[in-house]
Amino acid sequence: MDRLAWWGEPHGGDQAFAVMIFAFHASTPLLDRGFRRTGSDATLGGIIFHFLQKPFIMTSLAVTSVPHTDPAAGLGAPAAAPVLLVTGASRGIGAATVRLAARAGWDVAINYVRDAAAAEALACEVRSLGRRALTVQADVAEEAQVVDMFEQVDRGLGRLGGLVNNAGIVDRNARLDEMDGTRLQRMVAVNLLGSLYCAREAVRRMSTRHGGQGGSIVNISSVAARLGSPGTYVDYAASKAAIDTLSVGLSREVAGEGIRVNALRPGIIDTDIHASGGQPDRVARVGPTLPMGRAGRAEEVAQAIVWLLGPQSSYTSGAILDVSGAR
């Protein structure tokens, strides 16, 4: 009988513990962030074990609790938390993702462009949860700044295990024939090139081909990618459709290297991005007309992002998940 030891945290992350699992088969690799393993790999069972009233997915047979340690460092050494970078994280969906990821056990790097005070206040929230936090200023449209940002995360938090490509912009309502080149170039630079630069740097760190230990990338798209946003911002919609294509293609490119890549398409979410696009009343105006009768909340989107990052979605890659209230 092969012995397996799996280390992890209960869903919610507020009480760390470890489990040791004994199983008969050693066949299917389970390479996902958020767990540390020793011994052979095992075929995933499907039972849910509740420990301290927290759900935890395990393989079957005998289970015994042991101190939460890093198996690579020997018994008694604390396990390192997985490291997550969230771009555009000082507000809205990005900030909600940081908070929820910290509660789930991630140490978090918080990227921002201008609002240093908001980023640092968010970092303080993360630290109050017992997790490490690092704030990093960078414009993702600038390749050199992206490279430097990842190097700061390397030095400040350690090996990267997750990336949320969240940074993005919209602009004021306009037809395509009313848009100038400056607007179009900035839209593509932030929304597409920024995600490409960040995904590239993440793969260079996570891929087993480069000596990494795997990880998860979640690219934030938009339902605009499939609706097209005619008469408002087809440039934004086009940039987000490219994110969908990036996610599918990259997921297949790195699937054998321990990296999962997925996209998430929010619908109309109650954040201040609408004001930056010249429509501060959009949520109040459009929300009641949506299928669910309301706009979504940033926390509802963050729940799906953190699920895609974590071990609960270990066989999910190349997916495009709508969080849009049936829109």
Image (cartoon, rainbow, N blue to C red):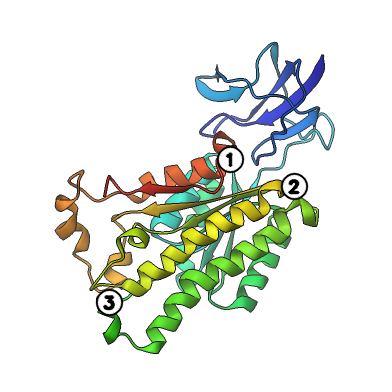
- In the image, taking residue 18 as reference, residue 135 lies left or right, namely left
Image quadrant where one finds the N terminus: top right
Question: Residue 74, image x and y in percent?
Answer: 84, 32
Assess disc 2: are there few (<14), some (14-19) or many (≥20) residues with their C-alpha within 10 Å of its C-alpha. some
Corner quadrant of residue 237? bottom left
Q: Of callouts 1 and 3, which one flags the residue occurring earlier in the amino acid sequence?
A: 1
Q: What residue is pinned by disc 2?
A: 213
* Extreme residue in the top direction: 62
Q: Quadrant of residue 268?
A: bottom left
Residue lying furthest right in this view?
Answer: 74
Residue found 20% across the figure and 48% down from its top: 294
Q: Is residue 299 above or below residue 121?
A: above
**Lower sequence index among marks 1 and 2:** 1
Sort mark 3 into few (<14), some (14-19) or many (20+) by Cα contacts within 10 Å. some
Which sits earlier in the primary sequence, circle 3 or circle 2?
A: 3
Few, some or many residues within 10 Å of mark 1 (<14, 14–19, 20+): many
Q: Give the label on residue 105, or none.
A: 1
Gap in angstroms between the C-alphas marked 1 and 2: 18 Å
Q: Position of residue 234 (x, y in %)?
A: 32, 72
Along the viewing direction, whichever of 307 and 149 lies nearer the viewer: 307
Q: Is residue 173 left or right of residue 265?
A: left
Against 129, residue 55 (above or below) is above
- The amino acid beneath tag 3 is Arg
- Mark 3 sits on what residue? 172
Whether residue 233 is visible here, answered yes or no, is: yes
Q: Which mark is residue 61?
A: none
Q: Position of residue 280 (x, y in %)?
A: 22, 67
Q: Is residue 84 above or below residue 281?
A: above
Please, what secondary structure does the residue beneath circle 3 have?
Answer: loop
